[in-house]
């Protein structure tokens, strides 16, 4: 299936592209970062599936859906709407425009793949695709950490998302651990982002708490290993485990 990704979050587009292209039955044929560009690529590329963000510049996702029929396409693509806002009013508006499905951020990448297959009429067992979903050594460290954070359910607009990613990369490269968080890593991140050490710590803590309570708790448990109980993992444990994942591929 040919997939077009439409989202103004460039980094998320890269993560989705990497993950989808590692499925044997999916191919990302293009990426667009605003609604006008999306309409042009839908007409030119003729994708089978469009992953469509709602909030975008120039023309939002609703505007894209409203204008889709004016393109006079030979075959209308299947539309899966991606949104960070799952309000009743928005859902009703989306239903009136007949997308195949919509997903609320954050979401699990494997669930997204399953929905693409399900709502494009291609739902079946894909053992090869499942194997391909394993860590690809060619994917950059930064994109790997970004993917893990999305799997955890950390919203990309949280400050703690960026802090966690940079902390994991620093730990993987320089071997920060234990007391190094407060003595070295937090001050280094604070200087980089123009904030305070306590601000970095609080933002990371907030991101971890949000993911634990609202994201993929089972994935976080697996990430943290047998030492993790029902308590929210500490900043240092999360950073260490993210770092280990980066170093392991």
Image (cartoon, grey):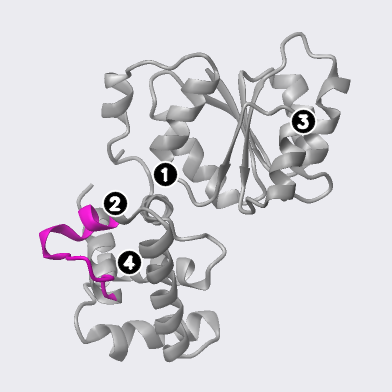
Give the labeled residue for mark 1: 108
Q: Is residue 187 visible?
A: yes
For the residues labelled 2 and 3, say whether their Cβ atoms are less than 8 Å apart: no
Q: Nearer the N terminus, badge 4 or badge 1? A: 1
Q: Is residue 174 left or right of residue 124?
A: left
The span from disc 1 to disc 2 (Cα, nearest Å) is: 9 Å
Give the labeled residue for mark 2: 219
Q: Nearer the N terminus, badge 2 or badge 4? A: 4
Q: Nearer the N terminus, badge 1 or badge 2? A: 1
Residue 89 is situated, as x and y percent measured from the top left of the image, at 74, 49
The span from disc 2 to disc 3 (Cα, nearest Å) is: 34 Å
Q: Is residue 132 left or right of residue 166?
A: left
Magenta segment: 219-234
Residue 51 is situated, as x and y percent measured from the top left of the image, at 61, 34
Q: Residue at x 42, y 40 (%)?
A: 109
Q: Which mark is residue 97?
A: 3
Mark 2, other Cα within 10 Å: few <14 / some 14–19 / many ≥20: some
Give the labeled residue for mark 4: 168
Q: Which of the two discs, 3 and 4, sits closer to the camera?
A: 3
Q: Nearer the N terminus, badge 2 or badge 3? A: 3
Asked which quadrant contains residue 36, the reply is top right
Above-or-below relation of 107 to 158? above
Callout 1: SS:
loop
Residue 84 is situated, as x and y percent measured from the top left of the image, at 61, 53
**Viewer-nearest residue: 141 or 154:** 154
Asked which quadrant contains residue 221, the reply is bottom left
Q: Residue at x 55, y 85 (%)?
A: 194
Callout 4: SS:
helix
Mark 1, other Cα within 10 Å: few <14 / some 14–19 / many ≥20: some
Q: Nearer the N terminus, badge 3 or badge 4? A: 3
The span from disc 2 to disc 4 (Cα, nearest Å) is: 17 Å
The span from disc 4 to disc 1 (Cα, nearest Å) is: 20 Å
């Amino acid at each position: 299936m040919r997939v077009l990704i439409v989202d103004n979050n460039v980094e998320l587009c890269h993560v989705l592209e990497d993950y989808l292209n590692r499925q044997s039955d999916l191919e990302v044929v293009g990426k667009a970062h605003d609604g006008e560009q999306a309409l042009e690529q839908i007409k030119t590329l003729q994708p089978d599936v469009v992953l469509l963000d709602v909030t975008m510049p120039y023309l939002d996702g609703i505007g894209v859906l409203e204008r889709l029929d004016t393109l006079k396409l030979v075959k209308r693509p299947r539309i899966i709407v991606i949104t960070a806002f799952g309000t009743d009013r928005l859902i009703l508006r989306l239903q009136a425009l007949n997308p195949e499905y919509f997903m609320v951020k954050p979401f699990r990448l494997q669930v997204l793949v399953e929905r693409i297959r399900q709502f494009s009429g291609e739902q079946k067992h894909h053992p090869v695709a499942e194997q391909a979903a394993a860590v690809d050594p060619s994917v950059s460290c930064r994109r790997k950490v970004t993917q893990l954070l999305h799997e955890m359910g950390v919203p990309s607009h949280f400050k703690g998302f960026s802090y966690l990613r940079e902390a994991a990369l620093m730990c993987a490269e320089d071997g920060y651990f234990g007391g190094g968080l407060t003595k070295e890593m937090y001050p280094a991140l604070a200087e980089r982002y123009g904030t305070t050490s306590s601000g970095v710590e609080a933002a990371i803590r907030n991101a971890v708490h949000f993911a634990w309570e609202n994201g993929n708790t089972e994935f976080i448990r697996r990430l943290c290993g047998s030492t993790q109980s029902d308590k929210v993992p500490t900043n240092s444990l999360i950073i260490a485990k993210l770092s280990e994942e980066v170093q392991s591929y």
